[in-house]
Amino acid sequence: MLLKALRKSAGFIVICLDRLSRPTPILRTEEEQLKAQSAVEGLSLYQLNGCAFCTKTRRAIRKLNVQIDMRDIGKNKQFRQELENGGGRVKVPCLLIEKDDKVQWLYESDNIIQYLQEQVA
């Protein structure tokens, strides 16, 4: 019970620090923004609100200035089940990539951020 309280407190601190120091989104022309947004179509991020690695990934997404479907597995049990069934394990962050009738589950915040940067660049 103490461990759970500590985890929740740490998550709250991570959330507060993120909100106080959000990165500035990249500014693009309207045409460039449409191109960047279309590059991330079919992507969904499975995450937890208080997870430090998920926060790192969300901050990178904010900086890239694109909208990705966010699926919080702590608030929605269906998302948790989708992650377990599709990805094979319940570990966040995880990026679901659905492109060209193919499905890929990408774990690890650094790998997700690198993938997104390559797509949007």
Image: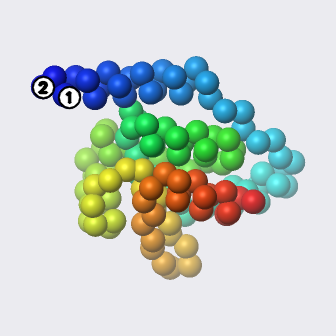
Determine which quarter of the picture holds residue 23: top right
Q: Residue at x 68, y 63 (%)?
A: 118
Q: Could you tell me which quadrant the N terminus lies in?
A: top left
Tell me the quarter of the picture where residue 119 sits. bottom right
Three-letter amino acid code of the residue under disc 1: Lys
- The front one of 100 and 88 is 88
- Up the image or down, 7 lies above or below 73; here it is above
Residue at the far bottom: name it: 101
Q: Nearer the viewer, residue 66 or 93?
A: 93
Residue under label 2: 1
Q: Amino acid at mark 2?
A: Met
Question: In which quadrant is the C terminus drawn?
Answer: bottom right
**Contact check, label 1 and label 2, Cβ < 8 Å:** yes
Residue 98 lies left or right of residue 118; in this view the side is left
Residue 25, x across and y down, in percent? 72, 38
The residue positioned 20% from the left and 28% from the top of the image is 4
Read off the residue under disc 1: 4
User: x, y (%) of residue 58?
Assistant: 54, 42
Q: Residue at x 61, y 46 (%)?
A: 61
Say if 25 sits above or below 67 in the image: above
Name the mark on residue 32.
none
Q: Count numbered badges in the picture.
A: 2
Q: Quadrant of residue 27?
A: top right
Q: Is residue 39 visible?
A: no
